[in-house]
Amino acid sequence: MDFEQLKSIITGRRNIKPFAMNGKRIPDEQIQALLELADWAPTHGYTEPWYFPVFGGDAVKTFCAAHAEMYKANTAPEKFIPGNYEKLKTQGDLASHVIVLCMKRGNKPGIPEIEEIAAVSCAVQNLWLGATALGLAGYWGSGGMTFSPAMKDYLSLGEEDKVLGIFYLGYTDEPMPEGRRLKPLSEKIKWEK
């Protein structure tokens, strides 16, 4: 692969919402291959803090239904929105797989939490770029009960562990939207020579 091919994959990565997916199944072997790419993320002290519960097949609907029920059980009646409940329940209907993006703290407490979160984010980027190279649609969401203690309990995570998002993978029939940046690069860097 040359630089231009890599550039094309990086600049072609898009966030495609699950409702724009078409329900076609991705072979589990491809999902496993993407997770193997994720496993090559940089990690301080080799803590490898990424942890990815993966839901495929009927387990996607089971997870989404459980997510909706978490929302219902943990939301005050005056704040409960039926539309949010239905969205959580059906969000994965057209996705092939759902991967929960978790950071599990290792046994090196001297490594700052932010570095562990950054390592997991790098792992997710590896996964996402691999998905882009395979022509798959991906969406990193953080709605509903993603950051709640109820989600951590559902996933049997420890006190210091964190859920960083929910990643939906699938195929889409829609054309990929154009990429855009809202601020010029010159506003985001400062050269010192």
Image: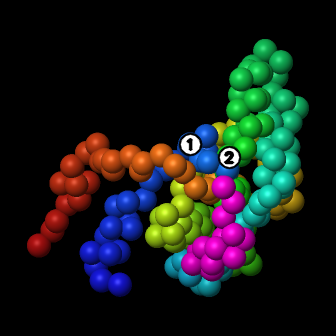
Ranked by sequence position, the earlier of labels 1 and 2 is 1
Q: Amino acid at mark 1?
A: Ala
Element class at badge 1:
helix
- The answer to whether residue 162 is visible is no
How far from the left and from the top, in percent, is residue 171?
A: 58, 55
Read off the residue under disc 1: 20
Q: Which mark is residue 146?
A: none
Callout 2 environment at 10 Å: few (<14), some (14 to 19), or many (20+)?
A: many
Where disc 2 sits, the SS reads loop
Location of mark 2 (residue): 94
Numbered range of the magenta stretch:
24-39
Decide whether residue 38 is among the magenta residues. yes
Nearer-the-camera pick, 128 or 77: 128
Looking at numbered disc 2 in the image, what kind of residue is underneath it?
Leu
Judge from the rendering whether residue 121 lies leftward or rightward of residue 151; answer left or right: left
Contact flag, marks 1 and 2 (Cβ < 8 Å): yes
